[in-house]
Amino acid sequence: MAQYINNDEMMRVASFYEPLRQRNLLFEQEFGRKPRAVVETHGCQQNENDSERLRGMLAEAGYDFSDDINDADVVVFNTCAVRENAEDKIFGRIGILKHIKEHKPHMLIALCGCMVQQQHIAEKIRTVHPQVDLVFGPHALYRFPELLEKAYKSRKTLLSVDDSDGAIAEDMPVMREDAHKAWVSVMYGCNNFCTYCVVPYVRGRERSRKPECIISEIEELARDGVGEITLLGQNVNSYGKDLEEDIDFADLIRRVNDIEGIERIRFMTSHPKDFGDRLIDAMAECDKVCPQLHLPFQSGSDKVLADMNRRYTRAEYLEKLNKAKARIPNLALTTDIIVGFPTETQADFEDTVSLLEEAEFDMIFSFIYSRRVGTPAAKMESVLSDEQIHKNFERMLSVQNEISRRKNEAYVGRVCRVLVDGESKTDSKMLTSRTDTGKIVNFAGDKSLAGKYIDVKITKAQTWSLYGELV
Ligand code: 5AD
Ligand code: SF4
């Protein structure tokens, strides 16, 4: 049963805003400006969502914001532990902060998120990187104002990375990135223990938010003009299993579909073992649910799937995928794949390639297997050499690029409704937008269209994006 942080505890934490504001006022008197904060996000959408809350809390405490760590008086790195390269990058960034802090001793450095929830990492930071002032895990997110105030007063690195399943905190302050789109977490944690994955160890067991909290958050977003929401959870198909109320994810999206002002509903991630008819029906019947499905298969080999503890077979996966395709017209499919899982042989890898060819995804997120401390797979011997794994990875990408391009070419000539995101980052004369299927469409238009839903005719397709013109 999910635990909730009670009101008294939220009030206790909120009492730390006042000393922070006082501190920041003194700063302003001394330096003639407010202190600036940088929140840098690594990893997944859940972290993006958490960072919006960190910024909300910092704003409440009287900070301004910057994107440049050289300008910062407070730096928060919201970290990721899913793969080693994410951790390496963060340690590189911590090294850079050390140099900046040498010239700016008042700068406060905080690390939070999944990477630092691992005991061996927290310990390494405390001993090797004493320039870090504050380290806290995902469960302590709501306590940020308290921890920040205490870190200012502490001479040593302040650690808050206790193991827990993390009680759910509602109504934290939030500063959202985008005026038209928002992430909404429906649950936290994961119970699946895939043998390669560190997430269940750092984010704890599955906990669902109460439906009324989710619905009222989305209603408020809709009132603020946010038309598109993405419901987030490590495995959204487990939603509600731990709630007293008899509700599952299919019921939840039907309720969200009824909210006035919401135009588009997306969600991620579904676990193939739990994905099924009830959700497919809800997707097909709810007009606002986008025809888009992210269904990670990880490997096309039954033996590797068993070693990964995924609890479905290739045939079961394909059957569910085909059912969804048949029931939902124009469905866009994406997936996650791991190449080089320790027990993967060359024949197993060929099964992954053949599944790619059979399933025809619009896009894939593919990763080379990364050994994670404390997971069962970390103790397994690798069958393939690193060189072979990299070769396989490249080959898989080239097979998929061909499929992605082909799927995008099918859009040429169609008129698509898109939500305009704003100016393209690479070409300021172009606007960038997304279809309901999640495809990027670039087209020439006035930036006043940002945030609007409009029709665009697709004129050209590339592997990663489409080009179009206003109709
Ligand atoms: N190595 C490589 N990829 C991983 N993922 C999770 N753990 C690992 C790991 N140890 C991938 C999976 C998952 C995605 C979010 O990250 O494909 O679906
Ligand atoms: Fe990791 Fe598997 Fe849970 Fe996804 S379902 S977060 S891959 S353990």
Image (cartoon, rainbow, N blue to C red):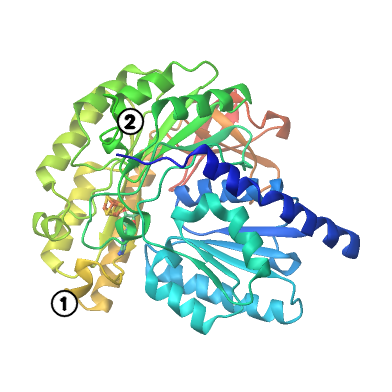
Residue in front for this viewpoint, 70 or 461: 70
- Position of 369 relative to 192 (above/below): below
Q: Secondary structure at mark 2?
A: loop
> For the C terminus, which image quadrant?
top right
State the residue in front, 141 or 331: 141
Q: Locate residue 414: give its quadrant.
A: top left
- Could you say which quadrant of the image residue 358 lies in? top left
Residue 414 visible in the snapshot: no
Closer to the N terminus: mark 1 or mark 2?
2
Mark 1 surroundings within 10 Å by alpha-carbon count, few (fewer than 14), some (14 through 19), many (20 or more): few
Task: Measuring from the top left, give residue 359's x and y in whole percent.
Answer: 22, 42
Q: Secondary structure at mark 1?
A: loop
Q: Which residue does the numbered mark 1 point to in the structure image?
A: 381
The response on whether ligand 1 sits within 8 Å of label 2 is no
Crowdedness near tag 2: few (<14), some (14–19) or many (≥20) residues, C-alpha within 10 Å: some
Relative image position of residue 289 (x, y in whole percent): 40, 25
Q: Amino acid at mark 1?
A: Glu
Q: Count the marks: how many?
A: 2
Is 246 on the left-hand or right-hand side of 37? left
Camera-side residue of 425 and 22: 22
Q: Which label number is shown at residue 464? A: none
Against 183, residue 134 (above or below) is: below
To which quarter of the image does residue 109 belong? Answer: bottom right
- Is residue 375 visible in the rendered structure shown here? yes
Q: How many angstroms separate mark 1 from mark 2 (CA)?
A: 39 Å
Residue 321 placement, left or right of 187: left
Residue at the spot x=51%, y=25% of the render?
216
Image coordinates for residue 143, horizontal then vertical, percent: 55, 53
Circle on res. 331: 2
At 31% from the left edge and 69% from the top edge, which residue is drawn? 370
The image position of residue 185, as x and y in percent, is 44, 39
Q: Is residue 295 above or below residue 65?
A: above
